Image: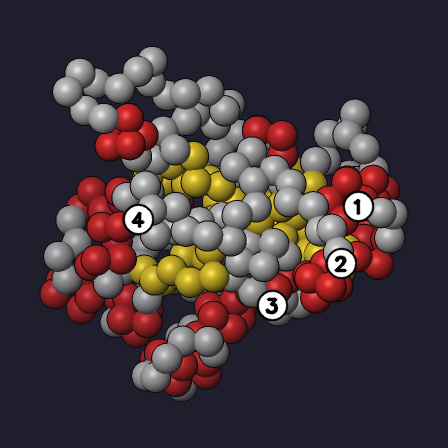
Amino acid sequence: MTADQLSDGWDQSRDPQLPFDVQPGDVIFQSPAAVVDPAGFVDSADVTVDDLQKFMSVFGNAPGVLAEPGLPGADALLVLEVQDGAGVDGTDGTDSAEPGRDSAESSVDGATIIAVQLGLMSSEAAANHMPALADRLTKPKVFFIGGNQEPVVLAVGLLDSDRLELDATPTPAPTRFGKRGQFLLISTAESAPSVDEQVAEVVGHVDPSMLRGLRLFHSYVRLEVEDLRTWVETGLVGVQAATAEDVFTDRPAETWRQLMKKRPFPDNLFVTWASHPERN
């Protein structure tokens, strides 16, 4: 999968046709209830074995396991695209709507989320493989583990959205996403234009300072929108708009706690949650 194949484009509005209110630039995070008492939560909530297996396939570990160096298990997922019944290659997953169903209803069937895991660093320095991008990367300058699908490198950039909002002609682009259009999916293909050229295509002029951050993710995850809705309804996960700090923090192991800062009371009390409270 390449940046060109993630082509929904930047749109600040929610799509009323989608079966669940999620859009590119949202972050899907483990709920405090699942983190504080994973076993008790699973026993008391309406969570099936199938739900848990699907959760583990995208988060990398069981509910309640937060990211730690050297261990699988993501704190959260960053949504790159919501594909309306389409395949990863951008083609329609079905030939036509089923008889007796209107196109709006059939278009939401099989809607798929393409996302990358947050909080999981590798030990591989990005400069060893992509030296041309090394100077533009946000610390720590390593590859981040984005998922378990095909072996591709996805680059997520952070635009200076404050300056873009003051620009008379900010340009919506297929690779721009997020609540304020602050994120940019940048192609890492050998034949792709340079990073500065790709940014210029979006902002309308060449200005390297418009790119405030860059992070490389190895691979990605895929999940069904209907599964996400089930997880939210059972209290397994929550969804909110991602901020720059959520994606580009220099302390990836603190991603979940960073997310809790923006949650209403009492969730915001978990900013100081220890990964292993039983050791204290």
Residue 181 in percent (x, y) is at 61, 54
Q: Earlier in the sequence, mark 1 or mark 4?
A: 4
Q: Is mark 4 on a helix, strand or loop?
A: loop
Between the C-alphas of marks 3 and 2, the distance is 23 Å
Q: Name the residue under label 1.
A: 204
Left or right relative to 177: residue 99: left
Left or right relative to 255: residue 201: right
Amino acid tagged 1: Gly
Between the C-alphas of marks 1 and 4, the distance is 33 Å
Observer-nearest residue: 38 or 263?
Answer: 263
Between the C-alphas of marks 1 and 3, the distance is 25 Å
Observer-nearest residue: 23 or 135?
Answer: 23
Q: Earlier in the sequence, mark 1 or mark 3?
A: 1
Q: Name the residue under label 3.
A: 245
Between the C-alphas of marks 4 and 2, the distance is 32 Å
Label 1 crowd bin: few (<14), some (14–19), many (20+), radius 10 Å:
some
> Which disc, if any, is residue 20?
4
For the point 38% across and 60% down, the residue is: 239
Q: Earlier in the sequence, mark 4 or mark 2?
A: 4
State yes or no: discs 3 and 2 in contact (Cβ < 8 Å).
Answer: no
Residue 77, can we see it? no
Amino acid tagged 2: Asp
